[in-house]
Amino acid sequence: MNINMSSIMGKVKAFSESPEGKRRIKECLEKYKKEGRTVTEAGSVLFNDETMLEAAEKFINVLKDAARDALLPTVRDEESLDSVMKHFDSLDYSAPVKMPDGSAVIYVYFKDDLHRDSLQPDKWDGVENIIAVLNNGYDKHENMGKVWGVWHGVRVHALTERTGLRFIQQAIMDFNGNYGSEYNVTAEAGSDYI
């Protein structure tokens, strides 16, 4: 007799997605919650609000480390008004949001305004999310030409293209690889960060 593990897992997955499977999983999770259990019989971590909030804190720390490692642009003046890294101090997270399928989501976000003015504000709007621009990279608009402006009292030329630093994707890989199974969570990038 042969046992085909992928066939068994396919049947388990199909059952877990069926109405009966969802009902039975929900009943089991409610029973575990009432009993105060934190792991399943198989050893999987059961999420609770406290564990999820701890995972969000851990993700924020991993993201800050990835951003520092990416060497994001920083102005070293007395107030660091133009430091991109200062935005990482504004990272916060939502309360856990229960989803219809029984899972839960926590949203990690920047509380700061991530807008950057253009060097030529009379001609260009600037960018709405400097973190996304540095993470994703950019190419100049074909009609843009050279953009000159004054930044910290010095006439400068804007970069016309920049390779994405991909620090958010790096943080997600680091978090999922090092902590995903510990917290039984998976980090994913928001739509602004491709």
Image: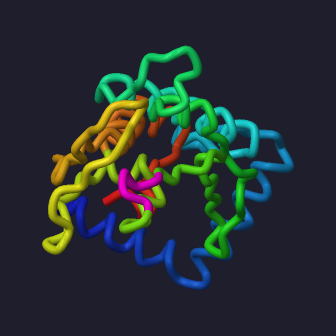
Q: Is residue 119 magenta?
A: yes
Q: Answer left or right for 33 relative to 160.
A: right
Measured from the top left, where is residue 16 in percent x and y?
Answer: 51, 72
Q: Answer left or right for 80 relative to 153.
A: right
- Which image quadrant for residue 60? top right
Q: Answer left or right for 78 relative to 12.
A: right
On screen, 89 above or below 93? above
Measured from the top left, where is residue 154 in percent x and y?
Answer: 33, 31
Observer-nearest of 5 and 153: 153
Q: Which quadrant is the C terminus positioned in?
A: bottom left
Observer-nearest of 47 and 8: 47
For the question of whether residue 178 can be seen, the reply is yes
Measured from the top left, where is residue 17 in percent x and y?
Answer: 50, 77
On screen, 110 above or below 179? below
Q: Is residue 116 magenta?
A: no
Observer-nearest of 7 and 117: 117
Q: Residue at x 43, y 65 (%)?
A: 122
Indicate the colouring scheme: rainbow
Check the image and name the residue furthest to the right.
Answer: 34
The count of marks equals 0
Measured from the top left, where is residue 124 in percent x and y?
Answer: 37, 66
Q: Which quadrant is the N terminus positioned in?
A: bottom left
Segment tinted magenta in the rendering: 117-121
> What is the magenta segment's predominant secondary structure?
loop
Observer-nearest of 115 and 11: 115
